[in-house]
Structures are given as C-alpha cells and as structure tokens.
Amino acid sequence: MEATNRRFFKFMMPGFHQKLNLPPAFCEKLKDENSKRAIINSCRGTWKISICKDRDGLICFENGWPIFVHQHGLNIGDVVLFEHTGELHFNAFFFDPSACEKEFFVEVKKEHEEEPEPVNADYHSRNKEREPVKKGSGISYHSYNEHFIVTMTPYHAYKTGKVTVPAEFSRSNNFWEIGSVTLRDPRRKAWPVKLLFQRSGQLRCRMERGWHDFYVSNKLKEGDVCVFDLNRHSKQPTTVLMDVQIFRAPL
C-alpha cells in the first residue's frame, strides 16, 4: 500500500459501539487480504479484533471492537486515526471533538512478589500504578476507582474459583467494611456474592461464594472480558452494587 494511503480517520457516529466500518477506498486496497483478525496497537496495549468482509469487499471490526471502545473511553464525536502497518495491523490515535489528542493513563507494572494463585494474573489493573501521558489538552480516561476489568481464565470456571478485586479498588471503596457485593448482569439480574479477605503482606479481597452461579448463568468462557462498574446510585446500605458488562472473546 502506498504511503499516502496508510492512514485514515474514523468519526465515532451512532452505532459505533458494536462495530466499525472501514472506508471503502481503504478496503479496496486490502481486497486480497484474507486474514480474519485485525491487530490494533494503542497506548493502552494490543487488541485482537475479528473482522467481517461482505461480498463487496467492505471490512468492519466486530468481535473485540466493543471492549476496545470501552477501554479507550470512546464517545460519539471522537475521532480515531488508524495507521496501517501491514496486513491487518494498525496503530490507533485518539482525538476528542475539539480536535485535541485525548489523554490516557498508561498502566505501568510495579515490581511485585509472586502470587499464589493464577487468577491474579488475569486482570488489567492489578498491582499497577497510573502514569499519565499528556497529549495536548485532551480529556482523561474513566475514573480509576469506579471500575475494573477481568479476563476469564479456566480458573474462573471452577466451583471454587474466585475473582480478585484490585487492591486499589477495594481500598478506595472501603470494601473491608462490607461482607458482600451484588453483581447485576446485562439482563439486570442480581447475584449476591460473598467477599473473602486475606492478608499476605497487604489486605486482599476476593469474590467467592456466588461467583460460580454468576459465571454459569451468563455462559462465560475463557477469554471473555467482564467489566465491573461500581454503581454509586445504589441505595442498598449493607452491600455494594456492581453492574457487569460482558464482552465475548473473538471466535
């Protein structure tokens, strides 16, 4: 592909949350590309996204795109600049409606001790501190202490499986003062889940009893991503309500 055709802009319009159509002129350049998955690199990591190509050769991002949107806090009116680097590999840059490049927090891993359970390696906000990357006068990403993300592993499917709550999240939201949380799935069904606290250097919080029922009912599987959003409007005095969004792993 010629250098002048290596980049294109996409404005985030209504409907962009579920899929994103690529420009027809750009798709024409990739008419002989047979890959079924795109790789997008951004300041927040690398993302594998399934693509769909219709009979006219038009390409759109599908499975994996919604979680990409959520992770980058994209809204209607935002603009994404895609830079094609070969095959179906892209670099992505983000701009808000004022045309300023958006500001994100890059998560930098700290040096830390080995964890006893494999579950501790699966969520993106574990034992990390935020390092702001200034990009013009753009806006910041979502509040760090209102949500966390867990990618499903085989461990989560066990009847004894647990979900580790990031330490910063549990401390900031006073989880040690309560004994349970209520998870509300995408169908708006509520699931009470007990919290387990353990101290090993620092206080650790895990969701245990009740988690397996949530996992089975929502037909979760390895690679699916759950976004746990704290619902600050809940009026339940003895528990915390968390809305859970589920993004299915690409097939």
Image (cartoon, rainbow, N blue to C red):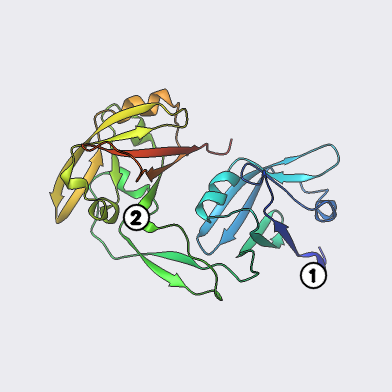
User: Which quadrant is home to the N terminus?
Assistant: bottom right
Which of the 4 image quarters holds residue 154? Answer: top left
Mark 2 and mark 1 residues within 8 Å of each other at the beta carbon: no
> From mark 2 to mark 1, how far is it between C-alphas?
42 Å
Image x and y of residue 46, in percent? 54, 56
Labels 2 and 1: the sequence-earlier one: 1
- Taking 206 as reference, is 100 left or right? right
Which of the 4 image quarters holds residue 85? Answer: bottom right
Image x and y of residue 232, in percent? 34, 46
Checking the image for residue 3, the label placed there is 1
Q: Which residue is mark 2?
A: 145
* Foreground disc of the pair 2, 1: 2
Q: Residue at x 45, y 35 (%)?
A: 222
Which of the 4 image quarters holds residue 84? Answer: bottom right
Report helix, strand or loop for mark 1: helix
Amino acid type of the residue that numbered disc 1 sits on in the rendered structure: Ala
Q: Taking 96 as reference, is 214 above or below it?
A: above
User: Which quadrant is home to the C terminus?
Assistant: top right
Give neighbour class at mark 1: few <14, some 14-19, many 20+ (Cα, 10 Å): few
Residue 237 shows in this picture: yes
- Taking 95 as reference, is 153 left or right? left
Amino acid type of the residue that numbered disc 2 sits on in the rendered structure: Asn
Q: Residue at x 53, y 64 (%)?
A: 43
Give neighbour class at mark 2: few <14, some 14-19, many 20+ (Cα, 10 Å): some
Residue 224 shows in this picture: no
Checking the image for residue 74, the label placed there is none
Q: Nearer the viewer, residue 213 or 88?
A: 213
